[in-house]
Image (cartoon, grey):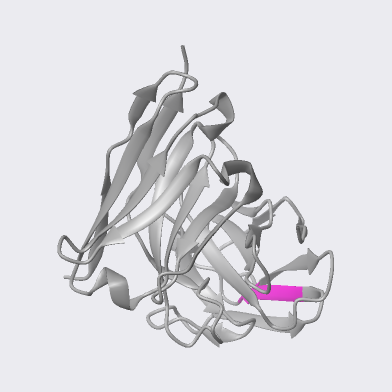
Amino acid sequence: EIQMTQSPSSLSASVGDSVTFTCRASQSIGIYLNWYQQKPGKAPNLLIYIASHLQSGVPSRFSGSGSGTDFTLTINNLQPEDFATYYCQQTYTIPWTFGQGTKVQIK
Amino acid sequence: EVQLVETGGGLVQPGGSLGLSCAASGFTVSAYDMSWVRQAPGKGLEWVSVIYAGATTNYRDSVKGRFIISRDHSKNTLFLQMNSVRAEDTAVYYCARASRGCMGSGGCLGLWGQGTQVSVSS
């Protein structure tokens, strides 16, 4: 099973900031990496698929990059609605696995 | 409206069975790769099972032989039959639809239901 490790586990930021967090796979996964946002009590929402493709309807302040084992999600000009938990997911091989999440909190 | 609605969650005793349903509207379930994903209380996301458009299925090891994923084209519904449940199966269970353009993996989950709570306890 491929292990996905996200860092940091949490971070504090202010509205208008740019934040970047990372996801590392325990083995190469090519570009089979997705990012989700989840708010408390809600289902996850797909933001980025195949490492860098923006899901339809997702604001352009979200961007993803990386390949192999190291990936990043960047949020520019952080908005109040962006405070949430973010999960990466590999779909290179079954079982698809998620990282443990990065919680973005208001500073 | 394109949406997924899960039902069937509840309290079940260890060793018991429970069936979850996920009714789809606005699209045809059998035309997409469909997954179940769960989230234990206060924990992260865990993929459980997938049924591909071609009807092939896959499971995570911890549920293999206990859970069965299926679909009914006439009802446009996805199912998860949970047998021999354990305390560690306690979670919110989400059904999710894969997005197109996922380079064939079927795991880019672009549409989710609201989730249904399953609690395993005596």
Looking at the picture, does residue B11 appear above or below residue B79?
above
Rendered location of residue B12, percent (x, y): 39, 22
Frontmost residue, B102 versus A13: B102
As drawn, B81 above or below A15: above
Locate residue A106 relative to residue B93 in the image: left or right. right
Q: Is residue B103 magenta?
A: no
Give percent across and percent down for residue A56: 40, 83
Front residue of A36 and A13: A36
**What is the count of numbered marks?**
0
Question: Which quadrant of the figure has residue A24?
Answer: bottom right
- Most extreme residue toward the top is B122
| Quadrant of the rendered image containing residue A13 | bottom right
- Name the side, left or right, on which B56 lies relative to A11: left
In the displayed structure, would residue B61 be above or below residue B15? below
Q: Main secondary structure of the magenta part?
A: strand
Q: Is residue B54 visible?
A: yes
What residue do we see at 82% from left, 74% from top? Answer: A69
**Residue at point 31%, 78% (across, down):** B31
Estimate the x, y position of residue B111 in percent, counting from the top left.
36, 67
Q: Quadrant of the N terminus of chain A?
A: bottom right
- The answer to whether residue B41 is visible is no
Taking the spot 40% from the left edge, 70% from the top edge, the residue there is B55
State the extent of the magenta-drawn residues as a range: A71-75
User: Of B29 and B16, which appears nearest the observer?
Assistant: B16
Q: Is residue A54 above or below residue A18?
A: below
| Residue A90 shown left or right of residue B102 in the figure | right
Residue A16 x, y percent position in the rendering: 57, 70
Residue sitting nearer the eye, B44 or B15: B15
